[in-house]
Amino acid sequence: MQRLIKNGELINNEWTLVEDEDFDLAEFSQGQWALPLPLYEKAVENGSAALSRMGVILNSDQDALKLRDYLDKLPLVVINFSAFADGRSFSQARILRDQLDYTGEIRAAGNYMQDQLFYLSRCGVDAFLLPEGVVVESAMQSLADFSDSYQAACDEPQPLFRRRV
């Protein structure tokens, strides 16, 4: 089982990530599942009774605005990094939090680097599915790499010059 940091704490990962878009939706008798966006849309279209136990996996090449109609039902959005150098996932998190007012869990998964954890948390990501080989204690320390930030972000809407007294 992959390790998960959520809100700065190591917790058990209760969600199963489904990567196969041809996964049989009849398998959802129990548990919590994060589905690729096309499969989630199919479940919504079919009126699945298990929607409250389904989340969405959003790949970096997919538009976060496509989730607008589903956000009130979504407990989890997994932002899947295809490559650590692909910054679109940062933008997706900001769009979800700032433009769409999403209050559920945003989880980073895939090919991100430990050095990005602090910045991802500033963009609204509150959970991190840790890749194999990452030292948990080091990753948790990365969430507090800096004591203060100049720019406004999801975690602090005022830039530093506005916060000074």
Image (cartoon, grey):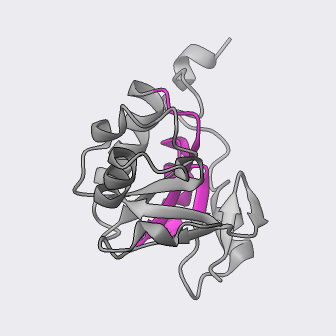
Q: Which of 133 and 160 is in front in this view?
A: 133
Residue 91's place in the image compared with 14, above or below, is: above
Residue stretch in magenta:
101-128
Compared to residue 42, the image places residue 134 above or below, namely below
Outermost residue, bottom side? 133
**Residue shown at 48% from the left, 33% from the top:** 97
Residue 39 in picture, x, y percent from top left: 33, 60
Q: Is residue 135 left or right of residue 156?
A: right
> Looking at the image, which residue is at 74% across and 73% down?
137
Q: Is residue 67 above or below residue 18?
A: above
Front in this rendered view, residue 111 or 37: 37
Q: Quadrant of the C terminus?
A: top right
Q: In this view, does 2 lie to the left or right of 120?
A: right
Residue 53 sits in quarter = bottom right
Residue 7 x/y as whole percent:
71, 51
Residue 106 within the magenta-colored segment of the rendering: yes
* Percent position of residue 60, x then y: 28, 58
**Side (left or right) of 74 relative to 81:** right
